[in-house]
Amino acid sequence: MIIGIPSEIKVQEHRVSMIPSSVGELTRRGHRVLVQKGAGVGASYPDDLYVAVGAEIVDSAEAVFAEAELIVKVKEPQASEVAMLNEQHTLFTYLHLAADQTLTETLVNSGCTAIAYETIEVNGRLPLLEPMSEIAGRMSSIVGSYHLAKHRGGRGTLLGGVPGVAPGRVLVIGGGTAGVNAARVATGIGADVSILEVDFDRMRFLDITMEGAHTVFSNEANLADLLPRVDLVIGAVLVPGAKAPKLITREMLRMMQPGSVFVDIAVDQGGCAETTRPTTHDDPTYVEEGVLHYCVANMPGAYARTATQALNNCTQRWTTMIADQGVSQACADRPELISGINCIKGQLTCGPVGEAHGMDSVDPSKLL
């Protein structure tokens, strides 16, 4: 198969979809790999490392899309990339379609087979999403702490406190992979951390493993009770493939202290607050109702090398399987891959995305 690796063009996105060792695995198996010139530079992987393992360097994204059958990316395709997709392509990347109806419609209309990392489910887990959730979770406490500084627009609260001064308070909404990692870093800083969660088994697990953090049952009353008393809120809510629920209303936000900080990890899925809107690493924050919002839609891109390596650890086996067998046979051997197919043959095949946009969807297994 011919596999294409284009440069990422989303603002301040420095990750690359495949590292040289992963490319080498494909070329050793007889596949042809086209890498756009400079695609790996942002993650400290220069072109010569790809050439050394048998890849071909091409000058443009157009050259990649023109020849490749399997396009492997990191972030959702931008408009110029969607325009180059057709029914001959299989696209393998993060898609987050529930947050973007225009992208959903244009991607479906392209006729390509689009497989989303974030909706591949294995034994109740989302293994291709987890490494980025871990990074975004850990980042959220770091950037939240930084933006609490007065010169960044925050309250001027040091989360860890000092002798004689109480630590800052952090509220993490959601006790999944991102939430646990956010809480772990926040407790490591020395903050007073509470985690809102709805699953009692998960709360018991967190209570045992997260020393220094408190678990609170997630409902509107408990959220409203906590918001006026915290310095940093981290939204770590996930409904696989679906739009994130709006748990924080504008009215709730007004309860928070001026200069408090809200970091929304769920922004890729539309965000968990009524006031959430996507930002970039170039311009990461804005203020609503006196609360500083950090809503960067590709947070792990800031730590491009670590994120690229972590992503490849999870995606390589799936990429290799698709390249070796094609989508239909790969799905036959590993039915979990079917859950990743968001559109195929001009039809939407992800139910939660269809519900988010009021669009019809079909079972992808019927189209393979």
Image (cartoon, rainbow, N blue to C red):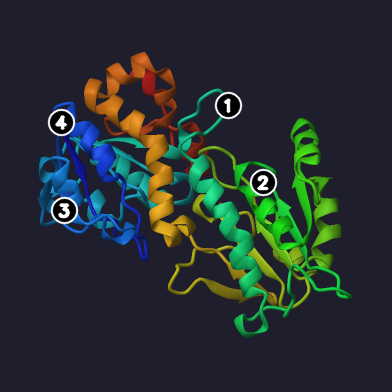
Amino acid carrying mark 4 in the image: His
- Residue receiving disc 2: 180
**Label 4, residues with CA under 10 Å away: few <14, some 14-19, many ≥20:** some
Question: On the rendered structure, is 187 left or right of 12?
Answer: right
Q: Earlier in the sequence, mark 4 or mark 1?
A: 4
Residue 48: mark: 3
Residue 269's spot in the image, x, y percent?
52, 49
- Residue receiving disc 4: 31
- Residue receiving disc 1: 124
Work out how far the residue at label 4 is from the one at label 1, CA to CA, in angstroms: 32 Å
Residue at horizontal 72%, vertical 80%? 156
The residue mark sitting in front, 3 or 4, is: 3
Residue 355's spot in the image, x, y percent?
52, 38
* Residue 189 found in image quarter: bottom right
Marks 3 and 1 in Cβ contact (< 8 Å): no
Residue 114: mark: none
Residue most toward the bottom?
151
In what quadrant of the picture does the N terminus appear? Answer: top left
Residue most toward the right?
164
Query: For this rendering, which residue is in front, 197 or 106?
Result: 197
Amino acid carrying mark 1 in the image: Gly
Q: Earlier in the sequence, mark 3 or mark 4?
A: 4
**Label 2, residues with CA under 10 Å away: few <14, some 14-19, many ≥20:** many
Amino acid carrying mark 2 in the image: Val
Q: Earlier in the sequence, mark 4 or mark 2?
A: 4
